[in-house]
Image: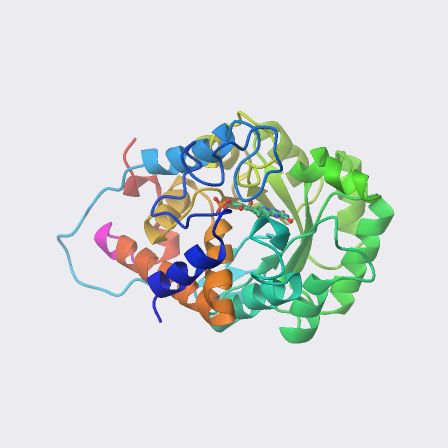
Amino acid sequence: MSVEDYRKIAREKMKGHCGVYKHCDGADIRICQRNAYGKGIGFGGVGSGQSFKNNFEAVNAIKLKMRVVGDHYNPNTEYDFFGNKLTMPIMGASVTGVNSFGGDEVITESEFCKATVLGAKYAGTIGWRGDTYTYDWDFMPCYDAICNVAEGWGVKISKPRDQEVLKKVFKKYEEGGAIAVGTDVDGCGSTIMAAHQKPVFKKSPEDIKELVNSTKLPVIIKGIMTQEDAIAASEAGAAAIVVSNHGGRVLDYTPGTAEVLPSIVDAIKGRTRILVDGGIRNGYDVLKMLAVGAEAVLIGRDIVRAAVGGGAEGVKTHFIHLQKTLEKAMRMTNVASLSDITREVIYG
Ligand SMILES: Cc1cc2nc3c(=O)[nH]c(=O)nc-3n(C[C@H](O)[C@H](O)[C@H](O)COP(=O)(O)O)c2cc1C
C-alpha cells in the first residue's frame, strides 16, 4: 500500500476532523479551521489559526537551488541522534489525544502510541510521544509503547507539569531504557490540564537545570521560538531544543518556525542540538529546514494521518516516503550527506 492509499483510508476515518488535504496549511476553508473560533481546538490551530498558517507559509517561502550538472551519486541521509544511528534526520513528533482525531472508534490512544513508535522503528527512525490530560500514573500508553513494546526505542516529552512529577516520569523512562526525555515548555498555557487536576507551569532556567540534573538521559526542551529562550535552555543544560510552536496550537499570531529558526541557529548552533517542527510535509521541506541550520525535524499531523490510515505499517510507509524525497532533494541540490547541507542549498 502507498502513502496515498493510507491517506485515503484516513480521509474516511477522520471525517469532520481532518480532510487529509493535499495542502495541510491551516487555511480557513479547511475542516479543522472552519467555524473553529472559540471551539475546542480539534486537529487545527489555536484561535484564528494564524500560527498554523504561518508555519506552512514560512516553509513554503524557502526556495531550493537546483544543481544537477555533476557526477551522479546516492545521497546518504543517515543521522546520529544521541549515539543512535537513524536512517534519516526525521522523527515522529510528540502528539497525543486521539479525541482530536475522531475518538476511540478511529484509533485508541494505546493503538496510536504503538503505531507511531513501532512504525518509526521499522523505518529506522524514532517516534516521540507526548503527554495529555488523560495520562496519569495509572494510564501510560506512551510508556507501554516506548519501554515495553519498542524496548526503549522512543523519546518521551511530558507536559511542563510540577517538577516532582516530571522528575518521577523522567526516572521511570530512564529505567525503562528510553533514548531521551523532555518537556514541551510551550504547553504551559494549557487550561485543560489544570481542569483535570494536572496543572502545568512555566519553567525557569533553574527548573530546567534541576530536570537536567535529575536524569542520566538527554533532556530536550520543546517549544522554543526566540533567541532568548534558546540561549536560556542551552545554558541550563538542555541536550537539544525543538524550535516549535506546537503546530500552531498554543499561542495565536506566532511566526512560522522557519522564520525564527535562523536567529536561533545563529545563537546556539554547535552548543545544543537544534531540531524543528511545524508545516514540514515532505523531504524537500526537510532539506529546507536543514539548510537553515536545524540538524533534524519532527513530523506531527502527517504521522497521525499515517497511523490512522494504516497503523504501524502506515507510519513506516510514510517515513520511508519522507526519506526518499529527502534523498531526491539532496541529489538535485548537489549535497551528498547531511554534513554537506548549508544555506548554499537555498536562495536568500
Ligand atoms: C492533535 C495534536 C496533538 C498534539 N499533542 C502534543 C503533545 O501532547 N505534546 C507535544 O509536545 N506536542 C504536541 N503536539 C505538537 C506536535 O508535537 C508538533 O509540534 C506539531 O504537530 C508539528 O507541526 P505539524 O503538525 O505541522 O507537523 C500536538 C499536535 C497535534 C496536531
Q: Is residue 24 magenta?
A: no
Q: Is residue 8 above or below residue 281?
A: below
Q: Is residue 328 above or below residue 184?
A: below
Q: How is the image coloured?
A: rainbow
Q: Position of residue 148 (x, y in %)?
A: 69, 74
Q: Residue at x 68, y 62 (%)?
A: 142
Residue extending farthest to the left is 69
Instruction: Using the rendered view, name the quadrant where residue 117 is placed.
Output: bottom right
Q: Nearer the viewer, residue 307 or 295?
A: 307
Numbered circles on residues, count: 0
Q: Residue at x 30, y 62 (%)?
A: 75
Q: Main secondary structure of the magenta part?
A: loop
Q: Is residue 124 above or below residue 58?
A: below
**Observer able to see residue 324:** yes
Q: Nearer the viewer, residue 302 or 173?
A: 302
Task: Tell me the magenta residue range.
Answer: 331-336
**Observer able to see residue 235:** no
**Quadrant holding the N terminus:** bottom left
Q: Position of residue 27 (x, y in %)?
A: 41, 34
Q: Position of residue 287 (x, y in %)?
A: 36, 48
